[in-house]
Image (cartoon, helix red, strand yellow):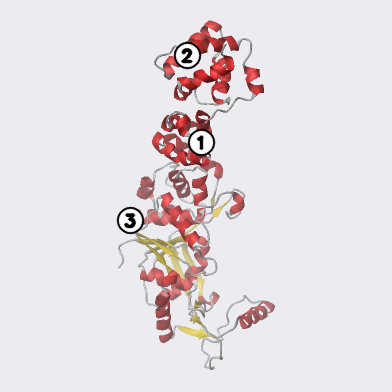
Amino acid sequence: MRTMVRTRFAPSPTGFLHIGGARTALFSWAYARRHAGTFVLRIEDTDIERSTEESVKAILDGMAWLGLDWDEGPFFQMKRLSRYREVVERLLREGKAYRCYCTREELEQMRVAQRARGEKPRYDGRWRESKAPPPPGIAPVIRFKNPLGGEVTFQDLVKGAITVSNGELDDLVLLREDGVPTYNFGVVVDDLDMKITHVIRGDDHVNNTPRQINIFRALGAELPQFAHVPMILGADGERLSKRHGAVSVMQYAEEGYLAEALANYLARLGWSHGDAEIFSKEQLVEWFDLAHVHRAAAHFDPDKLRWLNHEYMKKVSDARLAELMKPHFEQQGVRLTDGPPLEMVSNLIKSRSATVLAGVAAANPFYSDDEPPPEDLEKSLTAEVRPALVDLLNRLSSIGDWNDQSIMEVLNAVLKERKLKLPQIAMPLRLIVFGRAQTPNIGPTLAVAGQKRVLERLRKHVGT
């Protein structure tokens, strides 16, 4: 009897790691970690025409970014072809599989005739018990002798009991003529060899499971437990696709989302722990179970993900946020040595920034010499305000200990003497120093900008 939990994630390297695949990987990873088990990574690369090394790298990069570390693998199916052949030979010897010599044209004629009779298109088993000699020049496929009667029943850990009549299943191909296994055969051999105890995957695989169970049974193998998680839909109720926006995990990294925020959001797509919305991966591992995976489809909400990322941005350390922002500044050719330490700026802007990229945009004025829009400056720099800014310039010049407290003491004194409100001075002050009207609180912002920059910009625009 198996006791050690072993889960797997088995993507096809025909594209990037998308949101649905990442959620499946996260659930499989969390279940293994929760039970002190083993998480196996397997690359199902038997789609020779579409599988690429670039996609393999993208999948591995996406999982590494999300922190989904695997214990074994990655294993590649194309490196296991001899093993699939070995299992097929056994099934042939035991009379549980057979060679089929139908050509593609014959199979198409078969389907056309069945549709004409109003029947479901399927292989009719013509070579199942045939004694006819093999036709010359045709490489056979190997088909499985699916049971002709009875039914397959399994207890899905998410969906409950599922029963399918064997009469609904035809004799599927196990091995193609080129010796490459089909999906349903390859995964059975792999799950058997890798001693997988729990198969956690998307519910688009539910229809494959009865076929796989029959192969497991033909091999006399113990069945893993199956858990089919709900699909992810866009806000419009359609299956999530590129038209709904970013669907590649690494695209979210490029757009400035934090890995832990995306992992948190993915965990809540189709699973819940009470009302908890924000939780760490450590908490996910502690709480995760399959009993609370929802049966209904999950809906991907970009606005909620952005909100959640903003909550994580507020808590991220100044040093880490600075490190995340640096590459973006480098790409823009911005010299960070021309401004204050990036960590200090990070502290100022992170509570106002929903993403790392938003943080970069908010931090950019500290390192640029952008001039204010003339019409905006003219509107705010009134005859009443200009003398107050000249007065402020003179007083700021005499500050010996430049910090937000000393700056605000000077600013409040000017406001009081000139009988002005803070917004009347703060607006043109922001425009002059940073070239924009929106910044964090004026005192800490001017303190981080530095006395030299503030005085130079004020002299340029209001100095006499």
CA gap between label 3 and label 2 equals 62 Å
The answer to whether residue 406 is above or below residue 109 is: above
Is 45 or 165 nearer to us in this picture?
A: 45
Q: Looking at numbered disc 1 in the image, what kind of residue is underneath it?
A: Val
Q: Which residue is mark 1?
A: 334
Question: Would residue 124 be visible to someone looking at this image?
Answer: yes
Q: Residues within 10 Å of mark 2 (few under 14, many from 20)?
A: some
Residue 416 drawn at (x, y percent): 52, 7
CA gap between label 1 and label 2 equals 28 Å
CA gap between label 1 and label 3 equals 48 Å
Say if mark 1 contacts mark 3, CB within 8 Å.
Answer: no
Sequence order check: which comes first, mark 1 or mark 2? 1
Residue sitting at 43 percent across and 36 percent down?
A: 322
Residue 178 drawn at (x, y percent): 50, 79
Is 265 or 324 nearer to us in this picture?
A: 324
Say if mark 1 contacts mark 2, CB within 8 Å.
Answer: no
Q: Residues within 10 Å of mark 3 (few under 14, many from 20)?
A: some
Residue sitting at 45 percent across and 16 percent down?
A: 407
Q: Which residue is mark 2?
A: 396
Q: Which residue is mark 3?
A: 35
